[in-house]
Image: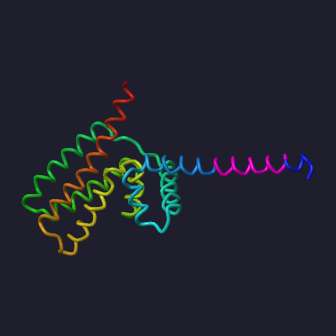
Amino acid sequence: MDAWVWILIVVAAVVVIVALASWFALRRRRRRMLHDRFGPEYDRSLESARSRRKAEGELAGRAKQRDKLDIRPLSKAARERYAAQWSELQTRFVDVPQVAVAEADELTTQVMRDRGYPVDDFESQSEMVSVDHPDVVQNYRTGHDIYTKTTRGEASTEDLRKAVVAYRALFEELVTDGERADEHARS
């Protein structure tokens, strides 16, 4: 074979190797970015999906959908009003824990609505919240699961306590998130 044919084969092989290396590097970078953005939610998605590719595609889709939303911080007055409502809710827990759990679910949903999250159904809520608050979205799922048990009359007092604690984690994150945004705007 002529020398130019060998050169062409080597160049083609190098191009293929570089393309494959680039493709693997991009996949690794995307995986790292998704893991960094979603934290524990990334691992949860991997466990529940049939493949890593499906899980990562679903998470990327969530992020893309979330980025289209107009999520806004709460005003200082709204943060204070919600904090007072939560305080009252916790006080009522002692006498009527089932009602307090229902109120925790409702109050958390109201905060999400005011922030701009979709509140049509629980799955949409939890998916969009998982993009911005991946460290507490599992608490939200736990609280909602217990709330569902409560509506069927199947939750124990300890379950109800766990639900309020779980809701509080997301509630505080949603309410104070805007406060941090306001502080950054002032600096």
Which of 39 and 110 lies nearest the eye of the viewer? 39
Q: Please, is residue 187 above or below residue 128 in the view?
A: above
Number of numbered discs visible in the structure rendering: 0
Q: Residue at x 27, y 66 (%)?
A: 145
Q: Residue furthest left?
A: 95
Quadrant hosting residue 42: bottom left
Q: Which residues are magenta?
A: 7-22
Dominant SS type (magenta): helix
Please determine whether, in this image, residue 135 is positioned above or below residue 123.
Answer: above
The structure residue drawn at horizontal position 31% and vertical position 46%, both measured from the top left corner, is 174
The image quarter in which residue 46 lies: bottom left
Hey, which residue is sitting farthest right in the picture?
Answer: 2
Tell me if 101 is positioned left or right of 138 in this view. Answer: left
**Residue nearer the viewer, 17 or 151:** 17
Q: Is residue 11 magenta?
A: yes
Residue 78 quadrant: top left
Residue under the image location 37 percent in, 41 percent down? 73
Q: Residue drawn at (37%, 30%), measured in percent from left and top?
A: 184
Give the image's coloring scheme. rainbow
x%, y% of residue 29? 54, 46
Q: Nearer the viewer, residue 44 or 16?
A: 16
Residue farthest front in this picture: 1
Q: Is residue 9 left or right of residue 94?
A: right
Q: Give x and y (percent) for residue 27.
A: 57, 51
Please state which of residues 133 and 45 is positioned toward the viewer in this rendering.
45
In which quadrant will I find the C terminus?
top left
Please state the horizontal and vertical placement of residue 182, each as a whole percent of the image.
Answer: 35, 32
The image position of residue 44, as x and y in percent, is 38, 60
Asked if residue 165 is among those painted magenta in the image, a careful observer would answer no
Q: Is residue 64 left or right of residue 81?
A: right
